[in-house]
C-alpha cells in the first residue's frame, strides 16, 4: 500500500525549489462543516423533549444522533466523518457516570472525608478512564469507512496523567507545559487510522512558549486589576459605612473576562500546535485558529444562549463547529485512497461517559 | 435507484456506484463492482437530517449514500426508534410541542420535583450527619469570618438560657443552641447551621441593646432561625442546589467552555427563589412560636425594622437583602401580631 501521488502536476518544479523535507508535493483539502442551525435545532429540541419524557433514557440515543450529526456534516477531501457508537452501551456508561457523579456531589455536603476519599479514588482511576475514553472515541470514529483506534497502554497513561503531575509543584510548575506536550504526544502517537499510526512531530518544549505567554498575561492582568480595585475601593468606598459589594462583583467580573480571553488565547495556540504536529502517513493538518475569533464566538454564543433561555444552544454549537472546520486544512501527499482497515474490537462506553461528566465538573 | 460511494472494507478507496433494489436484493454496480446482496442482510444506519446513510454489507464492505428517500424506500421498517425520532424532527408542530414539554418539565422539576425530593431526603437524614456537616461549616466560618464574641460571658449565658427555656416548647427546639460571635465583616446577622447550631453576631445584639425589649427581639430572631432548623432549610437548599448543578452540568456539556456563566446565572436565580419561600416559612414558624410563649409577633416586626434601618435596601450584603422583601415581612409580622392581640382576652 505504498503511496502513489494522485495529483500535483507541478511536482517536478516544486522539488527543485523547496528544501528536501518539503519535497513531497501536497494538495490542500480544506475541512468544511455543512450542518445548519435550523435543521439541528429540530434534532436538538426533539432530543431534549424525548429525553425528558423518557426520564433520561433517550439521552443515549440523543447523544448518538448529536454526534452523528456533527461528524457526518464535517467533511474533508469530499468525504464525511462517521460516528459509529450505539446507544445501548452509551446508556450503560451514562448510568455508571450518573451514579458516580451524583455520589460525589452529594457526599461533599455530608462528610468532607468521604468526598476527599471519592476524589482521590477518581484521581487514581482517571488515567484508566482517560484511556478508556480515548479508545471508545477513536474506535467509533471513521472516515472513508476506515476506523480510528487508540492503542495506548495503561502504564504510560499512569505516568503521563498521574505520576508526573506529582513532580510539577517541585519545578515551580515550569514542567507543566512540557507535561502537556508529553500527554498530547501520547494521545497522537498511539492513535491509528486503520493500520496507519499517527505521528506527533512537536517537541515537548514547543508547548512552553504559549503557556509562558499566557501566564505572563494572566500575571499582569491580575496585578493591574487588583491594583485598580484597591484604588477604586479607597476612592469610592470610603464615604460609605460598608464596602461596596457592587464594585467588588464588577471587578471580579472584569478579572474573569480577562482570564477567559487568556484561556481562549492559550486554547487557540495549543490546538494549532497539536493539529499542525500530526502526521498521518505523510499527510499533515494545518490549523489556524485565532484567539480573537474564539473570544468573539464564545461571547456572542453566551449572550445569545442567555437571552434566548437556551433556545439558541443549537445555533451556538453549529457556529462553533463551522468556525473550527473553516480553520483546518488537510495537506495530502496523495495517498488518501490507500489506507487499510484494521480489525477493531468493541469498546465499552463507561470510561468515556464517566470521563466526560467529570470534565464538566472541572469546567465549573 | 440511488447513487452511492462503495468501500470494499479493506481500504479507504471510494468507488462511485449505482444501487437498485428489487425482488429482495440490492444490485450494486460501478467500475469493477457488480454485486447482488439480499436486502435482509444489509444493515442500514438510521436517517438523520440530510446526512448520509451507511449500508453495511455482509463481509465488511459498505455503501454510503446521501439519497435518504431512496434508501428509506428500499429498506422500510428499519431502526424503529430512530425512524420515529426522525419523523418527529421533521414536523413543525412536534418541534413546537417539544418546546412546551421542555418548559413544563423544567417548571415541574424545579418548582415541585426537586423541592419535594430534597425535603424527603433532608427530613430522613440522621441528626449526627447534619451535626457533622454543621461543625464543618462552623469551622470554615471561624477561620475566615467569625471571631470570638466580645459580649461578656454572663450576658451570653443569660441569653442562651433564655433561648433554651423558649426552645423547650418549640418543635425540634431541644436540638437547638445559640452561639455568639463577633463579626464586623458579616455585620448584624443570625443564621442556622445544619444540626441545630444558631449563630448570632455581636453586631446583631448591639443593634437591639439600647432597647427595653432587647431580649424579646433576640428571641424573635432566634425563633426564626429555629424555624430554619425545624424545616431543615439549609440541607434542603444544599440538596436542591446540588441537583440544579447536576442537571445544569448535563445540559452545559453541549455548550462548551462558555458554560460557566450559562450555568451560574439560572442556578443563582433558582436558589434565590427557593430561599424566599424558606424565609416566609421560617417567619410563620417564628410567629407561632412567639404566640405559643404568649409573646406578640410584633417584636419580630420591631427587630426587622431595626435591621432595615441599619441596612437600607440598596446594600446587598446586609441581612435584609439576603432575607428579601423586608417591608412585606414586617407587614406580615404586624398582621400576625394584630391577630394574636385580638385573640388575647
Image (spheres, grey):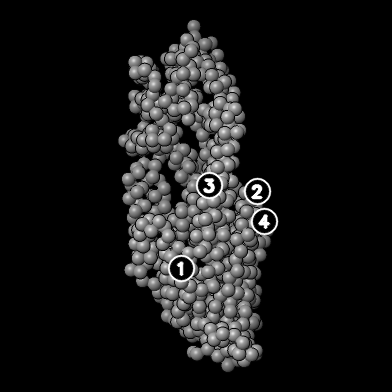
- The residue singled out by tag 3 in the image is A223
Q: Can you tell which of label 2 and label 4 is closer to the viewer?
A: 2
- SS of the residue under disc 4: helix
- The residue singled out by tag 2 in the image is A307
User: Are both tags, 3 and 1, on one chain?
Assistant: yes
Residue at 56% across, 26% down: A241
- The residue singled out by tag 4 in the image is B93
Work out whether mark 1 precedes mark 2 in sequence or the reverse, and give the earlier one. Answer: 1
- As drawn, the label of residue A242 is none
Q: Rounded to the nearest whole Å, what is the CA distance between mark 2 and mark 3?
A: 33 Å
x and y, in percent, of residue A360 in the image:
48, 55
- Can the viewer see residue A63 in this picture? no
User: Are both tags, 2 and 3, on one chain?
Assistant: yes
- The residue singled out by tag 1 in the image is A205
Q: Can you tell which of label 2 and label 3 is closer to the viewer?
A: 3
Q: Report crowding for label 1: few under 14, some 14 to 19, many 20 or more residues within 10 A (C-alpha).
A: some
Q: Can you tell which of label 4 and label 3 is closer to the viewer?
A: 3
Q: Report crowding for label 3: few under 14, some 14 to 19, many 20 or more residues within 10 A (C-alpha).
A: few
Q: Rounded to the nearest whole Å, what is the CA distance between mark 3 and mark 1?
A: 27 Å
Q: Is residue A252 left or right of residue B141?
A: right
Q: Is residue B201 above or below residue A4?
A: above
User: Are both tags, 4 and 1, on one chain?
Assistant: no
Work out whether mark 3 precedes mark 1 in sequence or the reverse, and give the earlier one. Answer: 1
Amino acid at each position: 500500500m505504498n503511496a502513489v501521488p494522485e495529483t500535483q502536476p507541478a511536482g517536478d518544479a516544486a522539488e527543485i525549489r523547496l528544501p528536501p523535507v518539503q519535497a513531497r508535493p501536497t494538495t490542500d483539502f480544506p475541512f468544511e462543516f455543512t450542518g445548519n442551525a435550523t435543521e439541528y435545532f429540530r434534532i436538538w429540541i426533539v432530543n431534549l423533549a424525548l429525553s425528558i419524557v423518557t426520564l433520561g433514557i433517550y439521552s443515549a440515543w440523543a447523544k448518538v444522533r448529536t454526534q452523528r450529526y456533527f461528524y457526518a456534516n464535517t467533511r474533508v477531501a469530499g468525504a464525511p466523518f462517521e460516528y459509529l457508537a450505539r446507544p445501548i452501551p452509551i446508556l450503560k456508561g451514562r448510568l455508571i457516570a450518573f451514579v458516580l457523579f451524583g455520589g460525589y456531589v452529594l457526599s461533599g455536603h455530608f462528610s468532607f472525608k468521604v468526598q476527599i476519599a471519592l476524589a482521590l479514588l477518581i484521581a487514581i482511576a482517571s488515567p484508566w478512564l482517560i484511556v478508556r475514553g480515548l479508545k471508545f472515541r477513536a474506535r467509533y470514529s471513521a472516515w472513508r469507512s476506515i476506523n480510528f483506534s487508540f492503542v495506548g497502554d495503561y502504564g504510560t497513561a499512569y505516568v503521563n496523567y498521574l505520576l508526573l503531575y506529582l513532580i510539577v509543584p517541585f519545578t515551580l510548575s515550569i514542567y507543566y507545559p512540557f507535561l502537556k506536550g508529553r500527554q498530547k504526544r501520547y494521545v497522537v502517537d498511539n492513535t491509528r487510522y486503520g493500520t496507519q499510526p499517527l505521528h506527533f512531530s512537536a517537541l515537548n518544549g514547543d508547548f512552553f512558549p504559549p503557556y509562558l505567554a499566557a501566564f505572563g498575561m494572566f500575571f499582569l492582568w491580575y496585578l493591574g486589576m487588583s491594583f485598580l480595585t484597591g484604588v477604586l475601593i479607597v476612592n469610592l468606598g470610603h464615604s460609605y459605612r460598608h464596602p461596596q459589594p457592587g464594585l467588588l462583583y464588577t471587578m471580579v467580573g472584569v478579572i474573569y473576562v480577562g482570564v477567559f480571553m487568556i484561556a481562549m488565547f492559550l486554547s487557540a495556540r495549543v490546538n494549532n500546535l497539536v493539529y499542525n504536529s500530526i502526521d498521518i502517513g505523510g499527510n499533515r493538518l494545518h490549523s489556524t485558529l485565532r484567539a480573537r475569533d474564539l473570544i468573539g464566538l464564545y461571547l456572542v454564543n453566551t449572550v445569545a444562549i442567555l437571552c434566548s433561555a437556551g433556545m439558541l444552544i443549537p445555533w451556538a454549537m453549529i457556529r462553533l463547529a463551522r468556525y473550527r472546520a473553516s480553520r483546518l486544512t488537510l495537506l495530502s501527499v496523495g495517498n488518501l485512497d490507500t489506507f487499510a482497515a484494521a480489525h477493531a474490537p468493541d469498546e465499552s462506553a463507561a470510561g468515556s461517559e464517566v470521563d466526560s461528566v467529570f470534565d464538566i465538573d472541572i469546567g465549573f | 435507484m440511488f447513487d452511492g460511494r462503495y468501500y470494499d472494507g479493506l481500504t479507504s478507496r471510494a468507488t462511485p456506484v449505482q444501487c437498485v433494489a428489487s425482488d429482495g436484493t440490492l444490485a450494486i454496480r460501478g467500475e469493477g463492482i457488480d454485486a447482488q446482496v439480499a436486502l435482509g442482510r444489509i444493515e442500514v444506519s438510521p436517517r438523520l437530517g440530510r446526512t448520509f446513510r451507511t449500508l453495511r454489507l455482509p463481509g465488511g464492505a459498505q455503501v454510503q449514500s446521501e439519497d435518504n428517500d431512496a434508501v428509506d424506500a428500499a429498506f422500510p421498517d428499519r431502526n424503529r426508534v430512530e425512524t420515529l425520532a426522525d419523523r418527529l424532527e421533521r414536523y413543525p408542530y412536534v418541534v413546537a410541542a417539544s418546546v412546551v414539554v421542555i418548559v413544563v418539565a423544567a417548571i415541574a422539576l424545579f418548582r415541585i420535583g426537586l423541592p419535594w425530593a430534597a425535603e424527603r431526603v433532608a427530613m430522613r437524614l440522621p441528626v449526627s450527619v447534619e451535626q457533622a456537616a454543621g461543625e464543618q461549616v462552623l469551622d470554615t466560618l471561624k477561620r475566615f469570618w467569625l471571631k470570638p464574641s466580645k459580649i461578656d460571658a454572663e450576658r451570653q449565658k443569660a441569653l442562651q438560657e433564655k433561648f433554651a427555656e423558649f426552645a423547650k416548647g418549640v418543635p425540634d427546639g431541644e436540638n437547638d443552641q445559640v452561639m455568639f460571635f463577633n463579626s464586623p465583616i458579616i455585620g448584624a446577622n443570625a443564621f442556622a447551621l445544619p444540626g441545630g447550631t444558631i449563630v448570632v453576631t455581636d453586631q446583631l445584639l448591639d443593634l437591639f441593646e439600647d432597647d427595653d425589649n432587647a431580649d424579646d427581639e433576640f428571641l424573635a430572631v432566634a425563633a426564626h432561625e429555629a424555624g430554619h432548623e425545624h424545616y431543615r432549610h439549609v440541607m434542603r437548599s444544599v440538596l436542591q442546589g446540588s441537583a440544579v448543578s447536576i442537571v445544569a452540568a448535563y445540559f452545559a456539556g453541549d455548550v462548551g467552555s462558555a458554560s460557566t456563566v450559562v450555568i451560574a446565572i439560572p442556578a443563582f436565580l433558582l436558589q434565590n427563589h427557593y430561599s424566599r419561600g424558606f424565609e416566609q416559612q421560617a417567619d410563620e414558624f417564628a410567629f407561632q412560636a412567639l404566640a405559643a410563649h404568649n409573646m406578640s409577633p410584633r417584636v419580630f416586626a420591631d427587630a426587622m425594622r431595626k435591621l432595615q434601618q441599619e441596612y437600607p435596601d440598596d446594600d446587598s450584603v446586609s441581612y435584609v437583602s439576603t432575607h428579601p422583601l423586608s417591608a412585606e415581612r414586617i407587614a406580615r409580622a404586624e398582621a400576625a401580631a394584630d391577630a394574636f392581640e385580638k385573640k388575647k382576652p
